[in-house]
Image: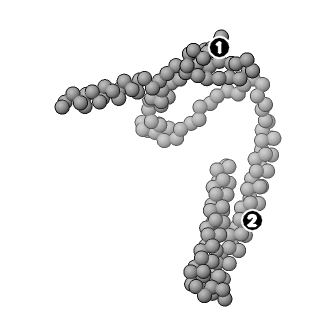
């Protein structure tokens, strides 16, 4: 009975190592880049691609556990290619200002829509329309009004968060 767990563990370890296969990259006659794990499909010039296992791709330490980094993860900085177009500072500031103006306009529009939706909800809560003999119809109408308020509130919150992130 004790050999069953050991055998199961051995099978799992063997299966996980077999899951990693060689990957080959080649360019076909039409110039398309292709990848395969079947070596006998390789025409002429193919190169083996090294693929790291997920365990190899994971960082060895968790950011913030040693007190450094404060739990923040920085993006890897990769230099731009030589011919990559660059934007000067004044152009970027103009773009940022235009973006901020668009966000402010959208925020003002959403605040107006939110206020209108709240007013419609307040006006519609206590009113029962003539075609609403069944009280469920009244509840459904009020639910739609509440959903509109919730949607506009979520939009306002998202715009305010986006504006705050811009600084």
What residue occupies the far left of the structure in this picture?
Answer: 1
Question: Picture coordinates of residue 138 (x, y %)?
Answer: 60, 82
Q: Which residue is mark 1?
A: 43
Decide: is 25 above or below 140. above
Question: Picture coordinates of residue 32 (x, y %)?
Answer: 71, 23
Q: Of residues 62 and 7, which is closer to you in this image?
A: 7
Question: Picture coordinates of residue 143 (x, y %)?
Answer: 59, 74
Apparent side of residue 79 relative to residue 86 in the rendered image (left or right): left
Apparent side of residue 162 relative to residue 39 in the rendered image (left or right): right
Mark 1 lies on a secondary structure that is: loop
Question: What crowding class fits label 1: few (fewer than 14 Cα within 10 Å), some (14-19), or many (20 or more)?
Answer: few
Question: Picture coordinates of residue 121 (x, y %)?
Answer: 64, 78
Mark 2 lies on a secondary structure that is: helix
Toward which corner of the image does residue 14 lie, by quadrant?
A: top left
Q: In this rendering, which labeled residue sits more in front, label 1 or label 2?
A: 1
Could you tell me which quadrant the N terminus lies in? top left
Q: Of residues 71 and 139, which is closer to you in this image?
A: 139
Decide: is 41 above or below 121. above
What residue occupies the far top of the structure in this picture?
Answer: 44
Tell me what residue is drawn at x 48 percent, y 26 percent. 53
Tell me what residue is drawn at x 75 percent, y 47 percent. 96
Tell me what residue is drawn at x 45 percent, y 29 percent. 55
Which labelled disc corresponds to residue 107?
none
Toward which corner of the image does residue 74 lie, by quadrant?
A: top right
Tell which circle, 1 or 2, labels the residue nearer the N-terminal end: 1
> Gap between marks 1 and 2, in whole Å?
60 Å
Whether residue 47 is visible to the viewer of this picture, yes or no, is yes
Decide: is 155 above or below 14. below
Which labelled disc corresponds to residue 109?
2
């Amino acid at each position: 009975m004790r050999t069953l767990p050991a055998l199961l563990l051995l099978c799992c370890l063997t299966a996980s190592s077999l899951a990693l296969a060689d990957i080959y990259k080649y360019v076909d006659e039409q110039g398309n880049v292709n990848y395969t794990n079947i070596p006998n499909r390789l025409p002429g010039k193919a190169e083996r691609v090294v693929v790291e296992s997920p365990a190899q791709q994971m960082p060895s330490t968790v950011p913030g556990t040693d007190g450094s980094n404060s739990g923040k993860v920085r993006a890897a900085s990769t230099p731009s290619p030589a011919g990559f177009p660059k934007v000067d500072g004044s152009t970027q500031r103009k773009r940022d200002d235009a973006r901020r103006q668009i966000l402010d306009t959208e925020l003002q529009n959403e605040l107006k829509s939110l206020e209108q939706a709240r007013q419609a909800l307040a006006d519609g809560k206590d009113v029962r329309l003539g075609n609403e003999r069944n009280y469920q119809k009244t509840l459904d109408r009020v639910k739609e009004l509440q959903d509109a308020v919730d949607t506009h509130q979520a939009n306002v919150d998202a715009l305010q968060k986006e504006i705050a992130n811009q600084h």
